[in-house]
Amino acid sequence: MRLVFHPLTLDRWPDLEALFGPRGACAGCWCMWWRMARTQWSQQKGEGNRRALRRLVSNGRVPGILAYDHGAPVGWCAIEPRENYPVLERSRSLARVDEWPVWSVTCLFVSRAYRRQGVATALLKAAVKHARRLGASAVEGYPAESRSGRLPDAFAFTGTVPAFRAAGFKEVARRSPTRPIMRRYFPGAK
């Protein structure tokens, strides 16, 4: 496997649709979970969320990066400045640790055939490079951690602690037993 990474732009939108499939990756989410109130998210679950994400991309936003293997899209990582995720900003357990301006990784999605092969870690490393190129001084993530063993795929949409550790992230806070806040600073940033 030889992965390459590209930011999601309008010309790559069909690749995201192919990766997410007709259900929008996770039950019609289309990576909108952290962007809108739960009632709105539920009301437009599926097609409405797909249109909402496409509007962001059509308006020039780059909400994340895609991973490709031999030209086929195999993974996705949502990453933008934290303030672009209003639900995250209102979260008590994931409240800001400090006033450090961070970019947030809010979603990792890997095609079923590519899971448990290091794609998530590679996506995280590529996301860090992407954010750094765009001026970020730190990247933060909110991985899920199981207390009883392996985490079911459906609950790992924010990534896993081992993947974040392997990508150089360190835990900076934990307000929930299963949801640490992990961060990676760039050299000279702190």
Image (tube, grey):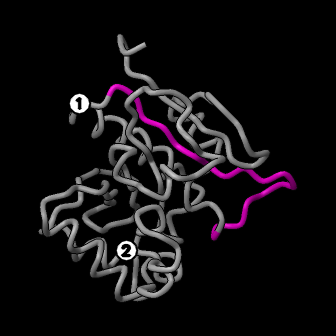
- Mark 2 residue type: Leu
| Point 75% across, 45% down: residue | 176
Which residue is tagged 1?
135
Q: Report the magenta residues as a range.
A: 137-154
Which residue is tagged 2?
19
| Foreground residue among 38 and 62 | 38
What SS does tag 2 mark? helix
Please tell me in which quadrant of the rendered image residue 129 appears: top left
Residue 92, given in percent of the width and then of the height, sits at 63, 48
- Mark 1 residue type: Gly
Q: Are marks 2 and 1 in contact (CB under 8 Å)?
A: no
Is 98 situated left or right of 177 in this image?
left
Q: Mark 2 and mark 1: span between their CA atoms?
A: 28 Å
| Point 37% across, 30% down: residue | 101
Q: Residues within 10 Å of mark 2 (few under 14, many from 20)?
A: many
Identify the main secondary structure in magenta. loop
What SS does tag 1 mark? loop
Q: Residues within 10 Å of mark 1 (few under 14, many from 20)?
A: few
